[in-house]
Amino acid sequence: MTVWRGLLLTLLALALWSFGIEPGWLQERQLALASPRWPLPPLKIAVAADWHVGAPHAGLDMVRQAVAQINAGQPDLILLPGDFVIQGVMGGTPVAGEEIAQALGQLRAPLGVYATLGNHDWWLDDGKIAAQLTQVGITVLENQAVPLHHQGQPFWLVGIGDDMTRHAAPQQALAKVPAEAPLIAMMHDPATAPELPARTTLAVAGHTHGGQVRLPLIGALITPGRAPRDHAYGWIPGQGVPTYVTAGIGTSILPVRFNCPPETALIRLSAKTSS
């Protein structure tokens, strides 16, 4: 009887943590990448995906907290790889796109704030949130590339459309990028990562939420889309292009997280020097 009581208390504690605490425990990941493909001065890139504003624990207050956290890191460039809205998450309360955009419009970076759209952004309002983000100064890149300059030196940023909704067109996105230009890629779904050219310095993605529930030695239990389970979180193993998949901020379907708290990421990209 004592054993069963202990097991029940353990399960209740895990449920309380996974549904009531961890989904609101926002982290900041500090990452570094030294790359021989990056000839420019060091660049700080903030990444925040899968906001799912309106999910439990991921309301406008969480957005403001994440915005403040990102701005405090003083990034040179901010990337938002999609899924700003919710659709069918248990216990969620939808938030108007205009309110989401106004809160995200407080993000600040010298090289700008750029976004792609996620599957929920397309499913909910056919991508109308793109115009709302644009109105507050956030540039939405859907299979597009833009040239940027960091300390007077050029590089290109590519935004690739969502794979799950069949908006991904990597070749179209890369068409105007000069062959020798330093290149950073942003996509909602890591399923597109294998299609990136080998010369890409860095790629970032979201969509998976890290699996939301990650068990020791097993990792993510479920991964949406075509990407394999071991591509659900962190640096993708075995990928020729260094690709970081963020755990995101909000939740989808169930408002649960275990061993996978919400996060923003700050990546310090630098040139790799020979020893």
Image (tube, helix red, strand yellow):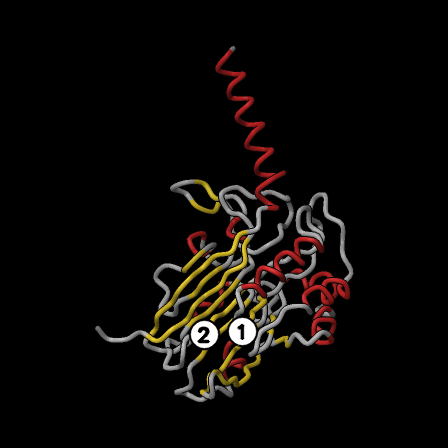
Relative to 40, say whether 165 is above or below: above
The picture quadrant where one finds residue 114 is bottom right
The picture quadrant where one finds residue 269 is bottom left
Q: Where does residue 118 sit, x and y in percent of width and height?
A: 62, 64
Whether residue 129 can be seen here: yes
Residue at 70% across, 69% down: 127
Label 1 or label 2, whichever comes before in sequence order: 2
Q: Where does residue 90 sit, x and y in percent of width and height?
A: 70, 44
User: Which of 233 and 270 lies nearest the eye of the viewer?
Assistant: 270
Residue at 66% across, 47% down: 57
Residue at 48% across, 57% down: 29
Q: Where does residue 122 sit, x and y in percent of width and height?
A: 68, 65
Q: Is residue 62 left or right of residue 40?
A: right
Mark 1 residue type? Leu
Mark 1–mark 2 Cα distance, whole angstroms, equals 8 Å
For label 2, the residue is 43
User: Which of 69 and 105 lies nearest the eye of the viewer?
Assistant: 69
How dense is the environment of label 2, judged by Cα within 10 Å: few (below 14), some, or many (20 and up)? some
Residue at 58% across, 71% down: 161
| Disc on res. 23 | none
**In the structure shown, which secondary structural element does the residue marked by tag 2 occupy?**
strand
How dense is the environment of label 1, judged by Cα within 10 Å: few (below 14), some, or many (20 and up)? many
For label 1, the residue is 77
Whether residue 87 can be seen here: no
**In the structure shown, which secondary structural element does the residue marked by tag 1 occupy?**
strand
Confirm or deny contact between disc 1 and disc 2 (CB under 8 A).
Answer: yes
User: Which of 151 and 39 lies nearest the eye of the viewer?
Assistant: 151
Relative to 28, say whether 9 is above or below: above
Mark 2 residue type? Leu
